[in-house]
Amino acid sequence: MNRSRRRFLGGAGALVALPLLEAAMPRAEAAVGAEPQRLLAYYVPNGMPMHAWTPSTTEPGFALPHVLAPLEDLREELVVVSGLRNAAADIDSAGHHAAGTAGFLTAARAMRSESTPLVGTSIDQHFARLHGGDTLIDSLQLGLQGGDGVGNCDNGFSCAYSRNISWASPTTPRPKIVSPRLAFDRIFHGDDPAATRVERERRRARRHSVLDYVGQQARELRGELGGADRTKLEEYFDAVREVELRIDRVVDASCDTAQLRDVLVHEPVDVLEHLSLMNELIALALRCDATRAITFMLGNSASNRSFPFLGIGQGHHDLSHHAGNAEDREALEMVSTWEVEQFAALLRRLREIPAGEGTLLDHCLVLFSSELADGNSHTHDDLPAVVAGRAGGALQTGRHVRAEGRPWGELLVSCMELLEVPVGQVGDGERVLAGL
């Protein structure tokens, strides 16, 4: 293969996927601007305060309610979908958080078991089966809160349901990465078949950049590229190095070896920096075409994380059970609005990155939702949902669509249809969602 058509640069302990360059595409594809589409599923726990979420009209120029207000400048990049019902998660006993999370990307009913999970295959895995062979990583699972997949996390439901949204098969969850360092390794050099653990550790110990290991190849490639491609490559390498430096600063902030181990294996202590790093890693992974399918969990199911940086000491799950208390409802709205702000920041980042004849966001389909509608009553009717990006022009955005009790699975089928992935049925969804 001509070097100008390479998709990766490789060195001992490092493998760097390249952004899509015009010189790397066959002439016929470059002529028609054949930019691949990507799927990103973004999960937040504990539902939403629906009275402050749902737009009051479907008329053009509809107002975004308080919790959705952070998306105002992105209005023309998204569709708000209301009225969807995930019947499979609406069980007749306790365990709604786990059941809802299990059904987030499967629309299937989870079998109540602590040791033998059974639910369905998630749509990101349907997408990965079609496109995963075209990229270094078939799919990437990320999140902020860890934990293994065994034991009882919600009234007899396995922790696998509460801590995963990606399912390779009805019995096999795809565990998420919560460490920015491990995520960086996975994206940029964790899959180099020539790399050994010793080589990777040696590079880290010397604080060499992953880019140092592909320097000669990068210099050769620059000489083969036109001006536009060369600029794109330089901007991409700058972004990779900036994230690498930020991760190193997080690691260097700890001198205690036990704390250092926690940082490397789990997560930074500061949730804001942790989330900011994960957002940037998502953007980089999609930008360099390391993968085209990503799932992200802002928290595990029924997360009780507190938000002292918002002036809120109570846990999120506790707040969601406000029982009508005015102060708790106000605090819950603040948390939910903050969650939407983080989602909006990621969408803006994707919109900043050129891709094809548009932006990276134009070539993504991004699904945002939760396991519940109202956390106080554990309802699965009228689930909060936003679909963002244009899926290469397939999705007509800038709208509010009322689904009027239609199955959640129909939205998942529609996502696959928009991305040209033939699935036929997802959970209880047997057709595309009318109006989307």
Image (cartoon, rainbow, N blue to C red):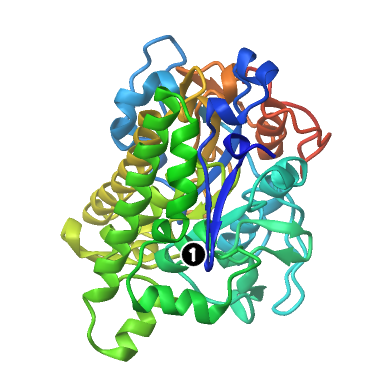
Q: Which residue is mark 1?
A: 185
Disc 1 is placed on an element classified as helix
Vertical arrangement, residue 294 with respect to residue 164, above or below: above
Residue 319, image x and y in percent? 33, 60
Q: Is residue 390 visible?
A: yes
Residue 399, image x and y in percent? 48, 17
Q: In this image, 32 relative to 379: left or right?
A: right
Quadrant of image for the N terminus: top right
Q: Amino acid at mark 1?
A: Asp
Residue 109 quadrant: bottom right
Q: In this image, 208 relative to 355: left or right?
A: left
Report the residue at 22% width, 85% height from top: 255
Instruction: Name the residue at the right extreme.
Output: 424
Report the residue at 47% width, 15% height from top: 58
Residue 344 quadrant: top left
Residue 286, image x and y in percent? 51, 42
Instruction: Name the residue at the top extreme.
Output: 60
From the viewer's side, name the closer residue of 116 and 252: 252
